[in-house]
Image (cartoon, coloured by chain):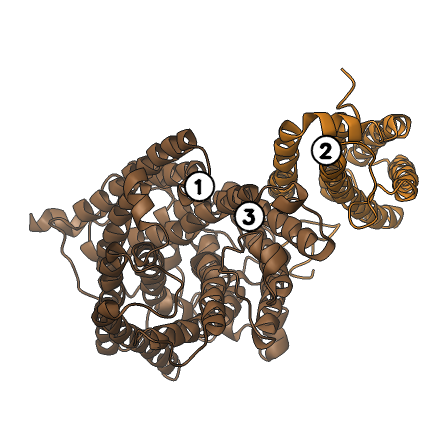
C-alpha cells in the first residue's frame, strides 16, 4: 500500500473503521486507532466488573450490621474492586485508549513506532485479565490490592497466585505501551514540531510513559519475589525466615505511588486540551505546564514513604518523605492555577467536555489538598487506614482520573467515531456524576475524621447516616456511568455527522478527517506555529 | 510491499526513512534496557539490605560458591561480548560471512556459560544449598545463609533466563543472516540484539563480585 495517495475529495467511507471488515481485521490489526478501540472495549468491561464490586460494598455498608456478605466475602470484594479498578482500568485507561489513538495523530505520525508491539500489549493485557478473572470465579482474593506480606505470602488462603501472576503480566502491557510512546514522541514528530510546540496531552503521555518504564519493572520483580515466597518458601519478606516485610512495602510503594501519577497525569493532559479549547484562549503558562508535569513525574518517585508513616520506617525517613510529599503540591497547584487563569476572561462554551474539566479541577483540588493532611506526619497517624484516606484517593482517582478520562472520551468521541453524541444527555450525566461523586465520597472524609476505619464490613451505629448518604451517592454515581454508555453507543447508530473539526480546536488531530484514515494524514503535516493559537477572536472582542 | 512488516528492501510503512527506523529501534532497545535495570534493581536492593543486615553470614555463605568457575564464566562472557561487537561491525559493513561466524561464536560462548552455570547449580544441590526444606548449612548463620542462597539463585537464575532469551534471539538472527536478510543498510536487529547481549553481560559483571567476592578483600 502506498503512503502517498492523494484524494482531492475525501471519501466518507475511507477511514480506519472501514479499512477492513470482520473480526480478524480487528484482532490482527496493527493500526494504533483500532488497537485503541480494542482497549476501550476491554477496559470498559473491567470498569463495570470493578464497579459491580463497589456497588456490593456500598450495599453492605448501608447498615451497621453485616447483612448481605460475610466478613471474608467483604475482604474479597474490596480487594477485587481495588485490583480490577487500579490495575485493569485506571492505569491503562487514558494511555491505552486515548493515548494510543491520539499520540500519533497529535504529532503528525502515521502510527506508533512499533505497531506490532502495540497489538501485543493488548493481548498481554487480556492474558493478565484472564488470570484475574479466573481468580475471581475461583473464589477471589482477600489480601487488599496492596498484597502486603507476610499475609499474602504465607497466611492468606485465597487465590493470591493467579491474581499476582495477572498483575505481573499486565505490567508488561503498560511497559510496552509506554516504550512505544517514548520512542514515538522522540523520533516521529512531524517536521517543525519541536518539543515546546507539542500539545500538553503529549507532554502528559510522555511523563506518564517515563514513570511507567521506571516504576513498573520494580513491581514486576516484587511480585516475582512474592510468588517465590508463596510457592517455594523463599524467605525474602518473611520475618520467620530472616526476611523483612517492610522491604515489600518499600518496593511495592516505589511502584504504586508513581502509579497514582500514571493515573492522574494523563487526565491533566486531557484537561489542558479541553480547557484551552472551550475557553477559546491559549493555555496560560504553556512552558510551566510542561515543566510542572515533568516535575510531578519526578517528585512522584521520591514520596513513596508517605504510605508507610506508621509501618515502622525510621522517623527521620518519615520527616524526609513528608517534606517531599508537600513539594508535589507545588507543580500540582501550578497546573490548577494555570487552568483557572486560562479560563479567566475566556469565552467559555459550556459543552460536555468542559463540564468534565470543571469537575476535574474542583475534585482534584479537594483531593490534592486533603492529600496534604495525609502528608503531615502528625495528622496522618490519626487518619491512616480510615475512610479519610479512602475519600482522598477516590477524589484523585475517580474525581480526577476518571473525570478526565470521560471528559477526553467526550472530547475526542467525534474524532474517533465521526459521530456526535446527544449533548443534552451528556450534560445531564456529567452533572449526575458530579453530584453522585460528591455525595458518595464527601461523607467519607467526615467518617474517616471521626475514626471509622476502612476495610471493615460492620461499624458502630453512629456512623450510619453518613454511610447511607454515601451509598445513596454511589447509586447516583453508578447511574452517571451507565447513561454515557447508552448514549455513546446510541450515537453509533446514526450516520456520520461531524466534520473534521467539530469543536474548532487546534491540534493536528483536528486537521484530518473524522474518523481518520488508516495512515492518519493524506500528507505528512508540517508544523510552523505555536500550539493553542485560539487568541484571534479574543482580541477582536476586547 | 506489505504494509506492516520490516522488509529487507526498505523501511516499514510508518517511518519516513531508514535512519528514522534505525534510530527508533535503537531508542526502543535502550528504553527496554532501562526497564531491565529497574527489574534487576529490585533484587539488588534486596541484596544490599540483607547483606548489610547479615554481613558475617553473607561472607561465610559466599565462601561456598565456586570462585574458579565463576571467574571462568566471567571470562567467557567478556569474550562473548567481544564476538558480539565483531558481529555488529561485520553487519554494518555488510560482511555476511563474518557476521554468521561471529554470531555462532557468541552463541557458543553464551551456551558455554550456561553449561558451566549448570555444573555450579548441580554442585549446590549435592551440597544441600538449595533454599527450602532440604537446606543445610553448619554454623550459627544457617537461616541467614539461606537468605544469601535465595538471593544467589534468584539473581543468577534471572540472569540465566536472560542469557537463554539472548541465545534464542541470536539463533533467529543467525538463521536470518544466513538467508541474507541483513545488509550494510539494514542491520538494526543485529545492533539492538547486541545492546541486549552487552546489557546481560554487564549484569553478570555486577553479580560476580557481589556474590562471589564478598569475603575476599
In the rendered image of this protein, which colour is used for chain B? orange
**Could you tell me residue B40's position as x and y percent?**
66, 39
In whole angstroms, how far apart are the C-alphas of marks 2 and 3? Answer: 19 Å
Quarter of the figure with the N terminus of chain A: bottom right
Question: Could you say which disc has been placed on residue A340 in the image?
Answer: none
Question: Could you say which disc has been placed on residue B203 in the image?
Answer: 2
Q: Secondary structure at mark 1?
A: helix
**Farthest left residue?**
A542
* Nearer the camera: disc 1 or disc 2: 1
Is residue A313 toward the left or the right of residue A158 in the image?
Answer: left
Residue drawn where x is 27% and y is 78% of the image:
A422
Count the numbered circles shown: 3
Is residue A79 toward the left or the right of residue A321 in the image?
Answer: right
Query: Quick check: can you spot residue B196?
Result: no
**Closer to the camera, A410 or A436?**
A436
Residues at marks 1 and 2, common chain? no
User: Decide: marks 1, 3 in contact (CB < 8 A)?
Assistant: no
Residue drawn where x is 61% and y is 35% of the image:
B45
Question: Could you say which disc has been placed on residue A216 in the image?
Answer: 3
Q: Secondary structure at mark 3?
A: helix
Q: Chain of mark 1?
A: A
Crowd band around label 1 with a 10 angstrom C-alpha radius: few (<14), some (14–19), many (20+): many
Q: According to the image, label 1 marks what residue?
A: A304
In the rendered image of this protein, which colour is used for chain A? brown
Q: Secondary structure at mark 2?
A: helix
In whole angstroms, how far apart are the C-alphas of marks 1 and 3? Answer: 14 Å
Residues at marks 2 and 3, common chain? no
User: Decide: marks 2, 3 in contact (CB < 8 A)?
Assistant: no
**Could you tell me residue A442's position as x and y percent?**
23, 62
Amino acid at each position: 500500500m502506498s503512503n502517498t495517495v492523494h484524494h482531492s475529495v475525501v471519501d466518507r467511507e475511507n477511514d480506519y473503521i472501514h479499512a477492513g471488515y470482520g473480526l480478524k481485521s480487528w484482532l490482527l490489526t496493527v493500526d494504533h486507532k483500532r488497537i485503541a478501540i480494542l482497549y476501550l472495549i476491554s477496559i470498559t468491561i473491567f470498569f463495570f466488573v470493578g464497579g459491580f464490586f463497589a456497588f456490593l460494598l456500598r450495599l453492605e455498608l448501608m447498615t451497621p450490621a453485616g447483612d448481605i456478605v460475610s466478613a471474608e466475602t467483604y475482604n474479597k470484594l474490596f480487594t477485587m474492586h481495588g485490583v480490577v479498578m487500579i490495575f485493569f482500568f485506571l492505569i491503562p485507561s487514558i494511555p491505552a485508549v486515548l493515548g494510543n489513538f491520539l499520540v500519533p495523530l497529535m504529532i503528525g505520525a502515521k502510527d506508533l513506532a512499533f505497531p506490532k508491539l502495540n497489538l501485543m500489549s493488548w493481548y498481554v493485557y487480556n492474558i493478565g485479565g484472564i488470570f484475574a478473572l479466573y481468580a475471581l470465579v475461583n473464589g477471589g482474593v482477600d489480601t487488599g490490592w496492596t498484597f502486603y506480606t507476610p499475609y499474602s505470602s504465607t497466611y492468606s488462603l485465597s487465590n493470591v497466585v493467579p491474581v499476582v501472576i495477572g498483575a505481573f503480566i499486565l505490567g508488561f502491557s503498560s511497559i510496552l505501551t509506554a516504550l512505544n510512546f517514548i520512542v514515538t514522541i522522540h523520533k516521529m514528530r512531524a517536521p517543525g514540531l519541536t518539543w515546546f510546540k507539542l500539545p500538553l496531552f503529549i507532554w502528559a503521555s510522555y511523563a506518564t510513559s517515563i514513570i511507567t518504564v521506571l516504576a513498573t519493572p520494580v513491581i514486576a520483580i516484587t511480585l516475582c519475589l512474592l510468588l517465590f515466597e508463596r510457592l517455594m518458601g523463599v524467605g525474602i519478606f518473611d520475618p520467620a525466615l530472616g526476611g523483612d516485610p517492610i522491604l515489600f512495602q518499600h518496593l511495592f510503594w516505589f511502584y504504586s505511588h508513581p502509579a497514582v501519577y500514571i493515573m492522574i497525569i494523563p487526565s491533566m493532559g486531557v484537561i489542558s486540551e479541553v480547557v484551552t479549547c472551550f475557553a477559546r484562549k491559549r493555555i496560560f503558562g504553556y512552558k510551566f505546564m510542561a515543566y510542572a508535569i515533568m516535575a510531578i513525574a519526578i517528585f512522584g518517585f521520591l514520596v513513596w514513604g508517605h504510605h508507610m508513616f506508621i509501618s515502622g520506617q525510621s522517623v527521620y525517613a518519615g520527616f524526609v518523605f513528608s517534606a517531599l510529599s508537600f513539594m508535589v503540591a507545588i507543580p500540582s497547584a501550578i497546573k490548577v492555577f494555570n487552568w483557572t487563569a486560562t479560563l479567566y476572561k475566556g469565552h467559555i462554551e459550556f459543552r460536555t467536555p468542559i463540564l468534565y474539566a470543571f469537575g476535574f479541577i474542583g475534585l482534584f483540588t479537594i483531593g490534592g489538598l486533603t492529600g496534604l493532611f495525609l502528608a503531615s506526619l502528625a495528622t496522618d497517624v490519626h487518619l491512616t487506614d480510615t475512610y479519610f484516606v479512602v475519600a482522598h484517593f477516590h477524589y484523585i482517582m475517580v474525581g480526577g482520573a476518571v473525570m478526565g478520562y470521560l471528559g477526553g472520551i467526550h472530547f475526542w468521541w467525534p474524532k474517533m467515531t465521526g459521530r456526535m453524541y446527544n449533548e443534552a444527555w451528556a450534560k445531564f450525566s456529567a452533572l449526575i456524576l458530579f453530584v453522585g461523586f460528591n455525595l458518595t465520597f464527601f461523607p467519607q472524609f467526615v467518617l474517616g475524621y471521626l475514626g471509622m476505619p476502612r476495610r471493615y464490613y460492620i461499624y458502630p451505629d453512629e456512623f450510619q447516616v453518613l454511610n447511607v448518604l454515601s451509598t445513596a451517592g454511589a447509586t447516583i454515581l453508578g447511574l452517571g456511568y451507565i447513561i454515557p454508555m447508552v448514549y455513546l453507543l446510541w450515537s453509533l447508530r446514526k450516520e456520520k455527522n461531524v466534520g473534521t473539526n467539530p469543536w474548532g480546536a487546534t491540534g493536528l488531530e483536528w486537521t484530518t478527517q473524522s474518523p481518520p484514515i488508516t495512515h492518519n494524514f493524506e500528507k505528512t503535516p508540517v508544523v510552523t506555529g505555536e500550539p493553542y493559537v485560539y487568541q484571534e477572536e479574543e482580541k477582536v472582542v476586547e | 510491499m506489505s504494509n506492516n512488516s520490516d522488509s529487507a528492501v526498505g523501511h516499514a510503512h510508518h517511518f519516513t526513512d531508514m535512519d528514522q527506523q534505525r534510530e527508533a529501534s535503537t531508542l526502543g532497545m535502550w528504553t527496554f534496557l532501562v526497564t531491565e535495570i529497574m527489574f534487576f534493581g529490585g533484587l539488588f536492593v534486596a541484596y544490599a539490605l540483607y547483606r548489610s543486615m547479615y554481613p558475617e553470614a553473607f561472607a561465610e555463605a559466599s565462601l561456598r560458591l565456586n570462585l574458579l568457575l565463576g571467574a571462568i564464566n566471567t571470562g567467557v562472557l567478556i569474550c562473548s561480548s567481544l564476538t558480539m561487537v565483531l558481529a555488529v561491525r561485520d553487519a554494518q559493513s555488510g560482511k555476511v560471512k563474518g557476521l554468521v561466524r561471529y554470531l555462532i561464536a557468541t552463541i557458543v560462548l553464551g551456551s558455554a556459560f550456561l553449561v558451566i552455570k549448570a555444573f555450579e547449580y548441580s554442585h549446590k544441590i549435592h551440597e544441600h544449598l538449595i533454599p527450602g526444606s532440604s537446606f543445610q548449612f553448619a554454623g550459627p548463620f544457617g537461616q541467614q545463609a539461606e537468605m544469601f542462597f535465595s538471593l544467589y539463585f534468584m539473581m543468577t537464575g534471572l540472569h540465566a533466563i536472560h542469557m537463554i532469551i539472548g541465545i534464542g534471539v541470536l539463533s533467529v538472527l543467525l538463521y536470518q543472516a544466513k538467508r541474507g536478510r541483513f545488509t550494510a543498510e539494514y542491520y538494526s536487529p543485529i545492533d539492538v540484539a547486541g545492546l541486549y547481549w552487552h546489557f546481560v553481560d554487564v549484569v553478570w559483571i555486577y553479580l560476580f563480585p557481589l556474590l562471589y567476592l564478598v569475603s575476599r578483600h
